[in-house]
Every structure is written in structure tokens, then in C-alpha cells.
Amino acid sequence: MTDMMKNIRIVEVYSDIAGYKKGASLGIDALKASSKELNADYFEKLQFDSIEDDSNSEGESQFAHAKYADVIEPIISKLAHKIKDIRNENKFPIVLAGDHSSCAGTMHGLKMAHPDAEIGVVYIDAHADFHSPYTSGSGNMHGMPLAMACAIDNLECQRNELSEKEKEYWERLKFMASDEPSIKPENVVFCAVRDYQEEEMDLIRRHKIPLYSVAEITQKGISSTVEEIFKKLEYCDHIYVSFDVDSVDPLYVPGTGTPAMNGLSYEQAMQLNIELIKNKKVCCWEMAEINPLYNNSKDDSTRIFKILEKVTQSLLKNY
């Protein structure tokens, strides 16, 4: 293992309890199978930690508006502390997650490790993930991680009354790192978001969050888009990139639980992540929502693995 490889730590999050459809927890093993088939020995070369869902939860959640919050909270907490430890060792975490709720843990962990820093977020996703239990129509918490990390209730758009227990868990999920929000909403940049509700768009407008549509990324090109993103976040000390595979059009990668049409092409997704990770301020990269149960064939997981491999190679060159 090269010295540079020792500076990277893979964190595997085996959980899909916050999603509408189960199967995202199988994504990591699908990537490992693809690596073996390609003789890539990716997972043999890098050090990694695993976070499991130990709840064995079955049946309906006791909560209507923050489903399985009692199960999700310890997973997010474990991930937050793991990210904090990795960053405190001056290492670069690559998070391979099941459903996207866990990225709240990544952001809380970055806040724990860098309490006085400005942390920027580049969020590449078909969905805004900006609901709170007060605004969510489904109660599925994979649609809430940014609201958790930014500690936003969005009561201006409230549609739900929460039970006391739901409120208690939601407060814990928001203020896991400290008694203030882990991420400022104005430090977020969205890419490829196209499936959102009015309550989320209200927040995006209110906080003037840039949203690069697929059409805009296509028109500007990847290099110019990335340049603009880093210009917008130039005052940030550290930047975190979260890549949900449903940002890619399901034509190229159908294997995700919440596909949305008119997404990034496979090549755009590859190049966008490769270009972003070249920036020295990027301190953490994450890939989420790979669901092999919805693949057309095992080639779909292989395509996603190739993004992981190429992004890691780009990181090693520039680290």
C-alpha cells in the first residue's frame, strides 16, 4: 500500500432503513463483486471501516413523520464519530452509503472535526433532501439529511404535527455535533436536482442556494460548472462532496431506489466527480443509494464501481 493510499479511509454504511424501497444496503457488496470481476483489487488496497444497522427492525415504524428515527439516530451518530476520528488523523474519508440519510452523519462528523471551520457542501442528487418531519409527505428520512445538518425545521411550510418522541429524536438528529447547525444552508450548492417539493424549493429560494440543473451543467460544461462552484464556496475551509447515484439518468444507471428522468449522463457524472475531487479543499467524498435490486444487469453496478475507482485515482493524484 502506498503512503497516499494510507491517507484514504473507506467507510461503509450498511443501512437502508430510511429509504422508501429497501436494497441500498446491498450496494456496497455489489461494488465489491464488480471490483473482483474487473480484477481491480480496490477493496484489498484500501483501509476501511464498516457501520452496520444492528436494529433488526421489522414492521412499521412507530413514527409517522420521522420513520425509524430511533433506528437511524444511532447509525448517524456512529458515522459522525467515525468521520471525526478519520479527519482528526488527517485522513480522507470516502463514504459508501446505503440510503442518503446517513450523509447527515458525515456532515455532523466534519463539524465535530472542524468546529470553527466554514464547511461547504456540493450535493449531487436528483432530490433536494431538504424536508423535515414537519414538511415531509412520506416521513421517509432519506429525504431529510440536509435539513438535519442545517438544523432546519421549515415551520413556514409546516404540514405535520409531531409527537413528543418524534420531536425529541429530530432535535437529537439536528444537534448531534454541537448546539448549533453543522452546515449553513448558504454553504450548500446543488447539482442535478430535479425532483423536489414546493416546501424544499421555498428553502432553496429563501437561502439563495445555487442549483445547477442538468441543462445548465450541459450548457456550461463540467469544467466551467466546477469552477463556478468553487468560486461560490471560496470562503469555505473544507468542502464535502455527496454523490447520490440517482443524479444520473436511469437510462444509464437504473439501480437506485428513487430514479428520476432527465438526469446527468454517465460521462457527466464521472467527470463532475473527478473534477470536484481535484480541489485541495475537498476533504470528504461520498456515494449513496446504489440499489442493485433495480439493476438491469450487473453491468450497472460495474459502471458505478468505475466512478468510484476513477474518483479515487483522481484523488490519489491530487492528494
Image (cartoon, rainbow, N blue to C red):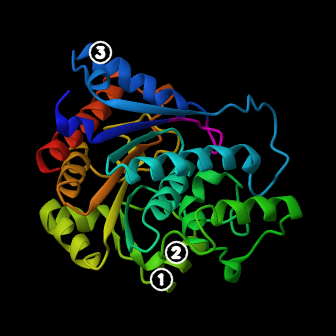
Q: Kindly report which numbered mark, 3 or 2, lies closer to the viewer in this rendering.
A: 3
- Magenta span has 19? yes
Q: Kindly report which numbered mark, 3 or 1, lies closer to the viewer in this rendering.
A: 3
Image: magenta residue range: 13-21
Q: Are marks 2 and 1 in contact (CB under 8 Å)?
A: yes
Image quadrant in which you'd find residue 295: top left
Q: Picture coordinates of residue 36 (x, y %)?
A: 29, 15
Q: Picture coordinates of residue 193 (x, y %)?
A: 41, 62
- The amino acid pointed to by label 1 is Arg
- Label placed on residue 205: 1
Q: Residue at x 19, y 46 (%)?
A: 315
> In this rendering, would 111 be left or right of 269?
right
From the viewer's side, name the closer residue of 205 and 313.
313
From the viewer's side, name the closer residue of 244 and 109.
109
> In this rendering, would 102 be left or right of 279?
right
- The amino acid pointed to by label 2 is Met
Would you call the spot at circle 1 few (<14 residues within 10 Å), some (14-19), or many (20 or more)?
few
Name the residue carrying label 3: 36
Q: Picture coordinates of residue 21 (x, y %)?
A: 61, 37
Q: Dominant secondary structure of the magenta stretch? A: loop
- Label placed on residue 201: 2
Q: Picture coordinates of residue 144 (x, y %)?
A: 60, 59
